[in-house]
Image (cartoon, rainbow, N blue to C red):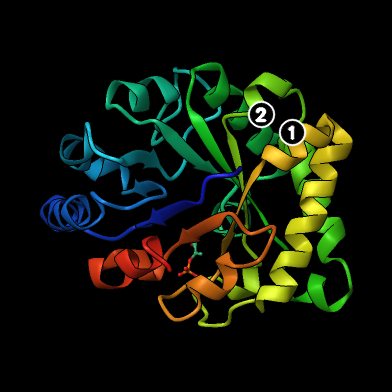
Amino acid sequence: MRTYFIAGNWKMHKTRSEAAELAKALVSQLKDGKHKYLVAPSFTALETVGNIVAGTNIMLGAQNMAAEEQGAHTGEVSVLQLKDLGVQAVILGHSERRHIYKEDDELINKKVRLALKHGLEVILCVGELLEEREAGKAEAVCETQTVKGLEGVSAEDLKRVTIAYEPVWAIGTGKTATPEDADAIHAYIRKVIGKLYGEAAAKAMCIQYGGSVKPENAAQLMAKANIDGALVGGAALKAETFVPIAKFA
Ligand code: PEP
């Protein structure tokens, strides 16, 4: 049985006081929630939010990290610094990192392996652009990003990896993949995991959907056999929209 995993990516939003206000609301409103939860604030609010969610059922996540442990990397944040703040998981390969900041599969894989080496959980994002979907390449793109992203990851470490399928054309656009289309890609990714790690690992793999998840569509998406949770952007910025997703019926 896979556990539903609902994560909120706050992106480059919220000052520390705004982040604290949202974190406090989530702690109180999700304390009876039945699923696995995570919030990923900006680096600047990690400590503030970490102090609020510590000891609750909400994990603390970061939105990115450097591919090196430490050194001359101006402007980067290392896994050691994240761990020092109590961070438990990191989102890697988000489409904004891939497409705006030109992170490639090789760099993302380096980060994945480093995060796992230091005991973090990883949410590895994969997903196709609109032109790739229209060219019939959605499965191939997701397969490549999954295979390359997981290169060198052991079966044991894979237990700390969640894959987030986020079709790029659905992120922040209000367009959601239909539950059927999303489920088909999730099933394909699960097949890829099966080829790499075997049937049991494929069955156990948590695959989140991301792309304009809202209170109105969360339950329909989550009802699909291969959709095990959500990575939420815009709707994660307010308790009144994140909580109904997190507590989808
Ligand atoms: C995201 O950025 O991971 C995301 C899914 O954003 P949104 O929910 O706003 O589409």
Residue 214 placement, left or right of 184: left
* Disc on res. 158: 2
Give the percent coordinates (x, y) of residue 134: 83, 79
Residue 28 in the image: above or below residue 215: above
Residue in front for this viewpoint, 13 or 226: 226
- Does dot 1 land on a helix, a strand or a loop? helix
| Kind of residue at badge 2 | Leu
Spatial CA span between label 2 and label 1: 8 Å
| Kind of residue at badge 1 | Ala
Could one spot residue 233 in this view of the protein?
yes
Give the percent coordinates (x, y) of residue 157: 63, 22
Q: Which residue is mark 1?
A: 201
- Does dot 2 land on a helix, a strand or a loop? helix
Residue in front for this viewpoint, 94 or 28: 28
Give the percent coordinates (x, y) of residue 31: 23, 49
Q: Mark 2 and 1 residues: CB-CB less than 8 Å, in contact?
A: yes
